[in-house]
Image (cartoon, helix red, strand yellow):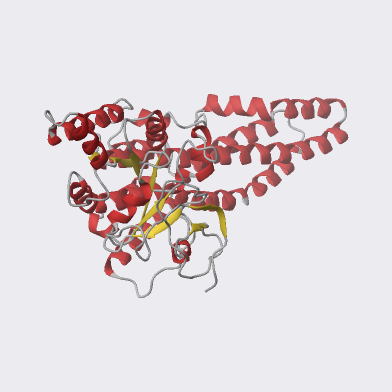
């Protein structure tokens, strides 16, 4: 393949590209890095299924199919149960996109190389150096851990990626797990990243890099009182305190040197990632489900929306009958019936919500708190009717009394329009509530397994 086009420049000490062309929709490389890294799609992009499917892949597909079917049939409890009933091994085929982030020059690229058993300059290694001019995330697949991709992110807090806009610029929500890399002391940038990651409901490790440099400096400054383990524990304590101050109960902190991957906490970092990989992949699978549910809920909403015109047409015929109050009563009863049906069809009626709350081990109030629709009681129906169609019906009936022919025309025109838009608004509200309730239930399920 031809040479890669670049944007931004290069890190000093990086090698020239070995070839490979840039695929559409994939990030640009820094000069000096093999283009093969850019052939990986960004997290969240469409990826064709592998063939033939392995047992773990079939189990993961079965879990996804079961979830889709349950959401389609309005059984949110079954949707959650379908995921809960799967073993951790069934999620082995799920990919895991790990974003490696931190301040510029903290050692992110060196850490990725060390995790992959490489050094700077090796074929396929991430480019390292003093200057960080990377403008796009770079992907590096782990050679041992299946389905794991490390994404080398530009440094936070630079002129190109200010702290306040870093998350939006790089769309951090597309990544499923994070490794925050810091050097020297715990910084405000780290605290900001932790808050953003926790806001997204995602997990992270905090890696304090360049431990060898700190130890060397301490040895030169205080040779007589030098105590390696004491210094390492001080560094760990500083990092744990900084992470814990952001509300993290059990901070996972590792003090490493990418130049000495067999010392300090580097073996523990590798072991921890390996042992937690099944649960991390399950967590990533749960994070992907709201988007899966959204398309199904939208399909149901579109199908039900197509039925509203039938009800509106009948109200048009009924409104032409010269009986005062008949159109309003019909609209009231039809509206309440349809609204109740919408709650049941989407699975957010009172009975279904109670079952879902029990399934995820949360009070039902936590689920109903995210809902914005008002329910199906007669008073609710009357309030919504008075807000949307009451005035129109009263005008039509006034005209009936004064000008019967003209009143019939006005009633026949107002009734279907108001009925249609009222039911469409309520359908949209219930569908949106379904998305919020299911997302809240999935959030509770993620918390239960963290």
Residue 87: in sight, yes or no? no
Q: How many marks?
A: 0
Residue 41 x %, y %: 47, 60
Viewport quadrant of the C terminus: top left
Quarter assignment of residue 36: bottom left
Q: In terms of depth relative to the viewer, which is nearer, 192 or 18? A: 18
Q: Is residue 436 left or right of residue 198?
A: right
Where in the figure is residue 286, as x and y percent of width and height?
A: 36, 48
> Nearest the camera: 139 or 129?
129
- Identified at 53% across, 57% down, the residue is 28
Residue 85: give x, y in percent of width and height.
25, 52
Query: Residue, x 54% and y 24% (percent of image)?
Result: 379
Residue 171 appears left or right of 210 = right
Examine the rendered structure and indicate whether residue 185 appears above or below residue 109: above
338 versus 295 height, above or below:
above
Q: Is residue 343 left or right of residue 141?
A: right
Nearer-the-camera pick, 345 or 289: 289
Residue 393 at least partly seen:
yes
Q: Residue at x 47, y 42 (%)?
A: 435
């Amino acid at each position: 393949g031809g040479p890669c086009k670049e944007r931004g420049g290069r890190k000093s000490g990086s090698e020239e590209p070995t070839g490979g062309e840039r695929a559409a929709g994939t990030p640009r490389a820094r000069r000096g890095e093999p283009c093969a890294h850019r052939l990986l799609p960004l997290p969240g992009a469409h990826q064709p299924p592998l063939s033939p499917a392995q047992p773990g892949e079939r189990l993961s597909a079965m879990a996804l199919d079961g979830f889709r079917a349950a959401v389609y049939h309005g059984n949110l409890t079954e949707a959650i149960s379908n995921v809960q009933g799967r073993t951790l091994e069934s999620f082995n085929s799920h990919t895991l996109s790990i974003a490696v982030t931190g301040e510029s020059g903290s050692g992110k690229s060196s850490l990725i190389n060390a995790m992959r058993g490489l050094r700077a300059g090796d074929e396929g290694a991430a480019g390292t150096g003093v200057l960080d001019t990377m403008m796009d995330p770079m992907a590096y697949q782990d050679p041992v851990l299946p389905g794991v991709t490390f994404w080398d992110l530009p440094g936070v807090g630079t002129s190109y990626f200010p702290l306040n806009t870093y998350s939006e610029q790089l769309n951090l929500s597309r990544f499923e797990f994070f490794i925050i890399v810091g050097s020297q002391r715990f910084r405000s940038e780290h605290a900001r990243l932790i808050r953003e990651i926790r806001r997204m409901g995602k997990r992270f490790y905090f890696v304090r890099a360049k431990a060898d440099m700190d130890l060397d400096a301490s040895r030169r400054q205080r040779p007589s009182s030098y105590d390696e383990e004491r210094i390492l524990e001080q560094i760990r304590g500083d990092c744990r305190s900084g992470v814990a101050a952001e509300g993290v109960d059990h901070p996972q902190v590792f003090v490493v040197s990418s130049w000495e991957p067999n010392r300090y906490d580097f073996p523990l970092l590798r072991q921890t990632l390996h042992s937690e990989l099944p649960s991390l992949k399950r967590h990533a699978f749960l994070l992907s489900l709201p988007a899966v549910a959204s398309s199904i809920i939208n399909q149901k909403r579109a199908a039900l929306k197509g039925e509203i015109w039938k009800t509106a047409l009948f109200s048009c015929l009924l409104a032409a009958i010269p009986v005062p109050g008949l159109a309003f009563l019909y609209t009231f009863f039809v509206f309440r019936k349809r609204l109740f049906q919408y709650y049941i069809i989407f699975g957010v009626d009172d009975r279904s919500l109670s079952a879902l709350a029990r399934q995820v081990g949360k009070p039902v109030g936590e689920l109903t708190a995210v809902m914005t629709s008002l329910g199906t009681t007669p008073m609710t129906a009357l309030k919504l009717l008075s807000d949307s169609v009451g005035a129109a019906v009263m005008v039509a009936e006034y005209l009936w009394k004064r000008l019967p022919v003209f009143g019939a025309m006005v009633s026949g025109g107002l009734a279907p329009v108001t009925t249609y838009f009222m039911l469409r608004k309520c359908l949209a509200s219930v569908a949106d509530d379904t998305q919020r309730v299911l997302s809240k239930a999935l959030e509770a399920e993620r918390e239960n397994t963290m």
